[in-house]
Image (cartoon, grey):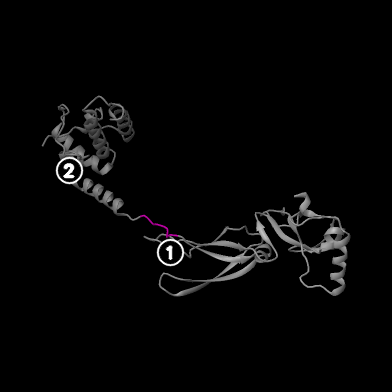
Amino acid sequence: MIFKDYYKILDLNGSGATPEEIKQAYREQAKKYHPDINTTNELAEERFKDISEAYKVLSAPASKRKYDRMWNTHVGKKRKNYEESKREKDSIFSDFFQMFFGDMITTEKQNMKKEKNKKVPIKGENIETGINVSIQEAFYGAEKKITLRTLNGKMKTFTIKIPTGIRNAEKIRLMGQGKPGENGGKPGDLLIKINIQNDKNYKLEGIELYTNLYLTPWEAALGTKIDLNAIDDTVSLYIPQGVQSGEKIRICGKGYHDGQTRRGDLIAEVQIMVPKEMEQKEKQLFEELQKISKYNPRKDT
């Protein structure tokens, strides 16, 4: 076994070097022989390992004292030239180091093994489901209950607070109600997708609300004033004479929430309704109108 002169490896004069001098010498030598810098020097990697090995021993007071005793015996007044000792393949420590400082290498390996075997906490997976709410529930806010089967097969009921103005397809997150984590990791979350359902009165598109405005033939022909139910108010509308089915009347600021302070519009689509059953007098008036009216909607098509 060839003794290794760690002081010579770090280009130091001997065991009288101070901790600061050792550290400074290591930095200079490491920088000089780093494999990333010395890409063309085949011996740079081995030299760099020796430099790291020397610093590891000399930077720790206990191992330095142990090494200095050997250094005085082997080198003393007459210093030998630096010699490279045999390493095991892929080993970062020489045979010399492992023979005389086996406790250090054992500790190093144990620490590396512990670090390798240390299990990283992993958060549990999220669980996603959906719930249907009415336009009114979404507009005003509500409390809903949903019952789900847990991983252990039991049924569990969750109470969900629907905030005012929630958007369609938005998700509500219940923290920690998902699948359990691994290695001490936090459980996942329960994500509940909100599905806003249209009804016979309103249809939601973005932040616009659509509704039907039903008119009689004479209201459409003559024009009129009506009261229309918005989702949170009643608005008065003036209907111009001659309005046609399918025309849309926009009522600004009476639609759905935009998630902040503004609201969308309420759009009323005109639907002209003809009575299926009529009184005798009503029928006579329609017959009279048919005789005197020259209007022919098919002529213009």
Instruction: Return the residue nearer the eye: 30 or 177.
Output: 177
Q: Residues within 10 Å of mark 1 (few under 14, many from 20)?
A: some
In three-dimensional space, the C-alpha distance between marks 2 and 1, rounded to whole angstroms, equals 47 Å
Q: Which residue is mark 1?
A: 179
Front disc: 2 or 1:
1
Above/below status of 75 relative to 137: above
Q: Are marks 2 and 1 in contact (CB under 8 Å)?
A: no
User: Where is residue 148 drawn, in percent x and y?
Assistant: 49, 71
- Quadrant location, the N terminus: top left
Q: Which SS class for mark 2?
A: helix
Residue range (magenta): 120-125
Above/below status of 111 relative to 35: below
Q: Which residue is mark 2?
A: 98
Please report whichever mark, 2 or 1, sits nearer to the chain's N-terminal start.
2
Instruction: Return the residue nearer the eye: 204 or 163.
Output: 204
Instruction: Return the residue nearer the eye: 79 or 205.
Output: 205
Q: Residues within 10 Å of mark 2 (few under 14, many from 20)?
A: some
Extreme residue in the front direction: 291
